[in-house]
Image: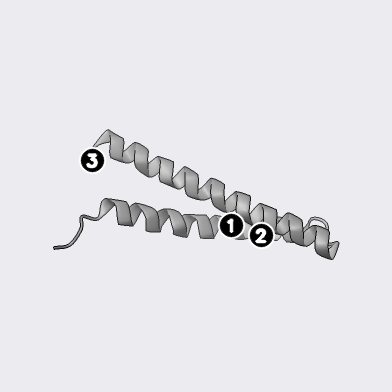
Amino acid sequence: MDATILWRIRGYVLLATALTLLVFGALGHGLDILLGTQPKAFIGLIILSFPVSNFIAIRLTKSKLTPPSR
């Protein structure tokens, strides 16, 4: 595999992880403020974000690595 492809894959994985952490963290923080359950929803959604980010990263890298079918 080409080195640039590997760096692209790393970038996609980093981007997917960072964005899902940000989104789930913001949702958890908002729910904690709204419901007054400091920090239970925040921690729960941060933990939930890891499998979601792995799923997104796998989907992104699969779509980028598989050649288009003819």
Write down the quadrant of residue 58 in the picture. bottom left
Q: Amino acid at mark 1?
A: Ser
> Disc 2 vs disc 1: Cβ atoms closer than 8 Å?
yes
List the single residue furthest toward the top.
3
Residues at marks 2 and 1, CA–CA distance in whole angstroms: 6 Å
Residue identifier under label 2: 45
23 relative to 51 in the view: left or right: right
Q: Secondary structure at mark 2?
A: helix
Residue identifier under label 3: 1
**Residue at 83% across, 65% down:** 35
Where's residue 54, x and y in %?
47, 55
Q: Secondary structure at mark 1?
A: helix
30 relative to 3 in the view: left or right: right
List the single residue furthest toward the left.
70
**Residue 49: image tag:** 1
Residues at marks 3 and 2, CA–CA distance in whole angstroms: 35 Å
Residues at marks 1 and 3, CA–CA distance in whole angstroms: 29 Å
Q: Nearer the viewer, residue 66 or 54?
A: 66
Picture colour scheme: one colour
Where's residue 70, x and y in %?
13, 63
Where's residue 62, x and y in %?
32, 56
Q: Amino acid at mark 3?
A: Met
Q: Amino acid at mark 2?
A: Leu
**For mark 3, does the 10 Å Cα neighbourhood hold few (<14), some (14 to 19), or many (20 or more) residues?**
few
> Disc 1 vs disc 3: Cβ atoms closer than 8 Å?
no
